[in-house]
Amino acid sequence: MMNRILFAVMLVAGLTAPFYAYPVFVMDLLCFALFACAFNLLLGYAGLLSFGHAAFFGGAAYIAGYSIKAWGFPPLIGILTGTGFALILGFAFGYLAIRRQGIYFAMVTLALAQIIYFMALQMPFTGGENGLQGIPRGQLLGFIDLDSSLSMYYFVFGIFLVGFGIIQRTIHSPFGEVLQAIRENEARALSLGYDVDRFKLLAFVISATLAGLAGATKAVVFQFASLTNAHWQTSGEIILMTLVGGLGTVFGPVVGALTVGALSHELSSYGSWVQVILGTIFVICVLVFRRGIIGELARVMKKP
Amino acid sequence: MSIQVIMSQALLGLNVGVFYAMLSLGLAVIFGLLNIINFAHGAMYMLGAFVALIGYSYLDQWFGINLQIGFWASLIVVPLVVGGLGILIERTMLKRLYQLDHIYGLLLTFGITLILQGLFANFFNVSGTPYPGQPESLSGVVNLGFMYFPTYRLFAIVFSLVVCFGTWYVIEHTKLGSRLRAGVENPQLTQTFGLNVPLMVTLTFGFGAALAGLAGVLAAPIYSVSPLMGADLIIVVFAVVVIGGMGSIMGAILSGLALGLVEGLTKVIYPPAASTVIFFLMVLVLLFRPAGLFGKEK
């Protein structure tokens, strides 16, 4: 029931947003919201903490940007190319990382993501510290001009809804149920005959792919793929968004991304204090607010 | 390519290696008893360098205290300060998380990293401030027979090795160490025998943090002191820990040293790969020996 109301709210807010908010800012939030949802699929439902999701987000942004700028791909194909790159990368990372468990899994993903970061820094096509600039938005399906911020906005909102839908479908499928079983008790899931590693790998690949979709879309929105997207701090930020909104809840990551994104935006004039404040929120969330906004809301509403 | 170039890069690599060793040793000690990975370990290292810098240059200017803490005094004072902060963090925050999934410990210390890094980024230049306190007696170069090497770097290598192997000796061969190992093996039983396990946990965390702080002091005269110095290092140390496995103290030390050496030599052979070679080695280890070289994961 609550989820239906929240979905309706999200749909109405999303459709009307460009009329009362700055569209580019909302598009930025939507990309991060999709990114957080993809991340939540992995941590919230499969119990796997990846500290390297920035590699998929940032990596896909570079590939999408480059394929559009240098090869003249149309925007949709470019975004799909970036997303495909994230899929392949996700398979490679996942294959390696699921060989270790728990805390090691987090460290392995972080270290693997650092390879992508250094590659983005050193390879000639990425523009190094300056990033990949001047990516043309182009025309969607050959006739919708994406330079208009309104049509760009609805394109991004559409991508967000598709990504969000895929994640919901995954969570509520038998596959998603098995993931949650693995999260709760891996040994038991294994003894019930589930090939745990394959489930984990598939969850990792789906999550990485959708994180890539978000990153590739962001590159087209800003016409820019930057090194920041691939930095470990972005991986940390997406964890924070998911945590603030509510781990393992359907709408938590969306709410978290809006909250943290809006907060960072409001505080952007305070320089490094933003980091201090985000760090403090992180600490508070871990210590006393582990359910997150949606998690707490659900708990309050369930009480008679 | 002359043998001198290779040797000097190897020694420089070893210099980095001792920092890897000290940090991964601290991580391993903490992990053994607390089962958490301290993400803030890099921040503690950075903090160590900054406390040394502030003690040397800014006490008078900032706090009106007419005192200058020299390099030698820093080697004692800084680990105490950083270790003290570690103890504070363990007592007030980490302690509440022991019943939960271990990833919460990682997330908490990640938040602490952001706070520390952000704080110092407000007051200091991100590109780094040089530490002027390197003692006169350690300046210049020494003749090693086959090459010349900076005296300070040699001192840093020897000093860190003494600290690392000293720690190993205490843990593996003394009564204190045997109690600690008992606490790692079976906390409940150790507690039943009348040993104060929570106190051991607190002190262990403080000790690990102090080691990171000490590494920071040693690094301060070599690298410029910057708010970001710890974060970049800790990720490499994570890879070192994955390669070595955290099962053994000696394993943590040796893999730190060896990987520093490998990184140094990569700088001679193929410079662009120097920043990623350890990560690629980690990939190889994961493929062929997933538990790590010294690991004993179930």
Image (tube, coloured by chain):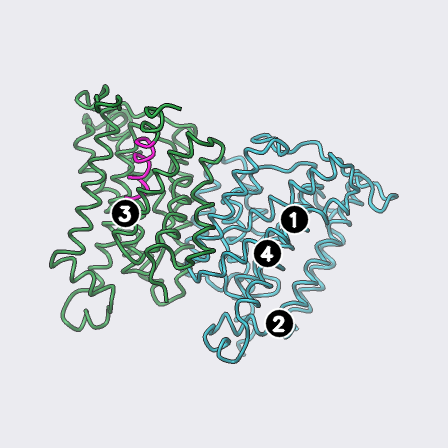
Q: Position of residue A100 (x, y in %)?
A: 44, 60
Q: Position of residue B290 (x, y in %)?
A: 43, 58
- Judge the density around disc 4: few (<14), some (14-19), many (≥20) Cα neighbours within 10 Å: many
Asked if residue B68 is among those painted magenta in the image, a careful observer would answer no
Chain ID at mark 2: A
Q: Earlier in the sequence, mark 4 or mark 1?
A: 1
Sequence order check: which comes first, mark 2 or mark 4? Answer: 4
Image marks 2 and 4: residues in contact by CB distance under 8 Å = no
Query: Left or right: B204 with respect to B238?
Result: left
Q: Helix, strand, or loop for circle 3?
A: helix
What residue span does the magenta drawing correspond to? B10-22
Q: Chain of mark 1?
A: A
Q: Earlier in the sequence, mark 1 or mark 2?
A: 1
Dot 3 corresponds to which residue?
A: B253
Q: Which residue is pictured at 65% across the width and 48% down the height?
A: A85
* Residue in view at x 28 percent, y 43 percent: B212
Which image quarter is the N terminus of chain A in? bottom right
Disc 2 marks which residue? A175
Colour displayed for chain B in the image of the structure: green
- Say whether mark 1 and mark 4 are on the same chain: yes
